[in-house]
Amino acid sequence: MKACNELTLKEKIGQLLMVGFEGLTPDANIQDLLHNHFAGGVVLFSRNLDTTRQAFALTQELQRMAMSSTGIPLWIGTDQEGGMVVRLRQGIAQLPAAMALGAARDPRLLYEAAKGTAEELRTLGINMNFAPVVDINVNPRNPIIDVRSFGDDAELVAELGIAAMQGFQDGGIVSVIKHFPGHGDTETDSHAELPVLRHSLERLRLVELVPFHKAARAGAEAVMTAHVGVPVLTGGKPVPATLSREILTGLLREELDFNGLVVTDCMEMDAVTQGIGVGEAVVRAVLAGSDLHLVSHIYESQLEAVAALERAVAEGRLTEERIDASVKRILYLKERHIVEGRELSWEEVSRRLQQPQTLRAIERLREMSITAVNREPDYCGLSPEMDTLVLWPQVAAASKSEDEPIYDATLGGILCSFITAKFKERMYGSSPGPDEIEALISEAANYDQIVVGVFHTASNPGQPALVDKLLTGKSKVIPVSLRNPVDLAAFPDAKGFLACYEPHPHTLQALSLVLMGKLKPTGTLPVTIPEYSSKGGVLYECRSASSAESAT
C-alpha cells in the first residue's frame, strides 16, 4: 500500500471522501469517482445490496477498480446496526435492535454476536460498519435514534456499546461509533434541519459524552460526527458539531484524547448544507478536524466536494499538511484492516456465512430481550383454551435511516399453533380511523383474550385510540410494543404489557413462547416509561437521564 508522501494532492483529497451510488453494479458515476477522482471509500445502502452473492461480487469489483487507479484499497462501509437498520437483509447474521440488546443486558453474548457478524461482513468484502449507536435515548420524542439506542442510561449504553465495538473490531472490521457528541436528546431529524442540544457542559459530561469517553479509552478506532448544534461549546451559536473545531478538535481530540478516525455523517443532509452547500460544508468539516467525509447519494454533490477541497487548498484556506494528517490516519487503519491476499471464491465465502455459533448467540439475545411489565401478577400470559384474537399493525419504516421491513411474519402466524380454542388474527392499518376502530372493537367483543400490537404510536395516533377502546371492554387485553416501549405510556390502565423492540420473525417466535408461558421474560426495560397525562394524552415527564440539568 502506498504511503501518504507517495500520493498526489488529488489522490490525497480522494482519500478524504466516501461516496455512494445507485444500483446493484458499479454505474458510470462511481466508475468516474474511483478512476478519475480517486475516492477512498464507498458507502453501500440497501439500493446496492440484494443477495450475499451479489454483495460479494460488488465489493470485489469495486476493490479491483480502486486498486487499478491508486493501488490503495477502498473503505467499503454500510449501516449494519441491527433491527430496522440493516442494509444487507438476507443470507447473513443480523443483530437485534440496539434497544433489544439493552433489554437483554448481556455484554459477553453481544460481543460474541457482533464479532461473528463482523466476520461475515468482512468475508463479503465490507470492512467498515457504521455501528454501534451509542447515543443515549433520554428523549421519548426523538424521531431518529429511538430503538437504535441501547437505552436511556449512560453507563448501560457505554458498556454495551463497547462490547459491540470490540466485537466488530475483533471480527476484523472498523467499528464507527456514532453520533458524536450525542443525538439522543433531540426532537428533530438532522436529515431535514439542525437539532440543538441546549445543555450545560456539566450535563454533557455526565450523560451524552460518557459512552464516547469510555469507548475512546477502550480503543475506539473511529467515531461518526452528529449534525447537531451544541451552543455551550460553540460560543452560544448552534453550529453543527460536524463543522465545529471546538467540538471535533477541542472536545473529541484534545479533551477525550481520541486519536482515531473522525468520520462525518452524510454531508448532503440539510443540517450541514443549509446556506452553504455540500462543497463548503466538507471544507469546513476538514478544518474542524474530520478525516473521512460521507457524500452518500448525489454525483453532482460528490464532484462539488472534490472541487471545493481543491479550491480551498489553492486559495490557502486548507493546507496540504492538514490533509496529510487525515490521510495518514486513513492509510494506517486501512493497513490494519484491509489485508490484500488471495481472492476467495464464492463457494468459500458462502461456507463462512450464518455460522451456527453466531446465529445461536443472536437468537439467545432475542429471547432474553422480551420484557414483561405485569401490573397484576403474571398478567401477560394467554390460556390455550380461551378464544383469542390478535390485532397486528402494518409495520413500516419510521425514519429516513430505516428501510422498509422485508419480513411478512406476524405474531398470529406463530401463535395460532398454541391455541386450541377459536383463534383469529386481524391486520389493521398503521393508524386506523374511527370506522376501522369501531369494526375492530365490535369483532373483539367475541373473544376472551386479545393481543394488540402497537408500533411507533407518535406517528400513528389511531393505534392508542384503538387500544384505549379495547381496554374498556370485558376481554383480557395485552398490548405489545413492537418498537420503543415508551409507546406503552399511553395505557396507564393496562394491567400488563410486553415489549419486544422489533418485529423480526425470531423475536416473534420468542414473544409467542412468553405469551404461552413456555419462556420466562427476562428482559429489563432499557428506557423509562414516561408519565402520561390522562387529560389529553400528553407526555409530561420523563423520569430518566433527561431529568438531569438541561438547558443553559
Image (cartoon, rainbow, N blue to C red):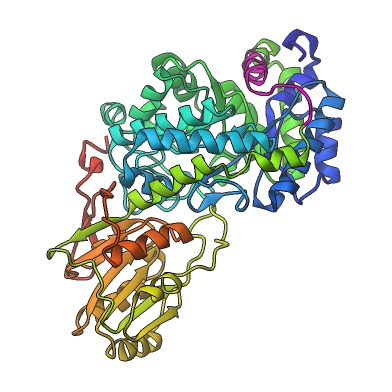
| Front position in the image: 317 or 307 | 307
| Front position in the image: 306 or 42 | 42
Q: Which quadrant of the rendered structure holds the C terminus?
A: top left
Q: Is residue 526 visible?
A: yes
Point out residue 420 in the picture as x, y percentages from the top left corner.
33, 81
Point out residue 542 in the picture as x, y percentages from the top left corner.
22, 50
Point out residue 340 in the picture as x, y percentages from the top left corner.
75, 22
Q: Quadrant of residue 434?
A: bottom left
| Front position in the image: 68 or 321 | 68
Q: Is residue 149 left or right of residue 347?
A: left
The overriding secondary structure of the stretch rendered in magenta is helix
Count numbered badges in the picture: 0
Q: Which quadrant of the rendered structure holds the N terminus?
A: top right
In the depicted structure, whether residue 68 falls above or below residue 93:
above
Q: Is residue 499 left or right of residue 495?
A: right
Identify the residue at horizontal 82%, vertical 20% (top origin). 71
Residue bounds of the magenta highlight = 325-343
Residue farthest to the top, as pictured: 5
Identify the residue at horizontal 22%, vertical 55% (top origin). 530
In the depicted structure, whether residue 473 falls above or below residue 343:
below
In the depicted structure, whether residue 48 falls above or below residue 78:
below
Point out residue 230 in the picture as x, y percentages from the top left corner.
39, 33
On whether residue 330 falls in the magenta region, the answer is yes
Q: Quadrant of residue 336?
A: top right
On whether residue 98 falls in the magenta region, the answer is no
Identify the residue at horizontal 36%, vertical 52% (top origin). 367
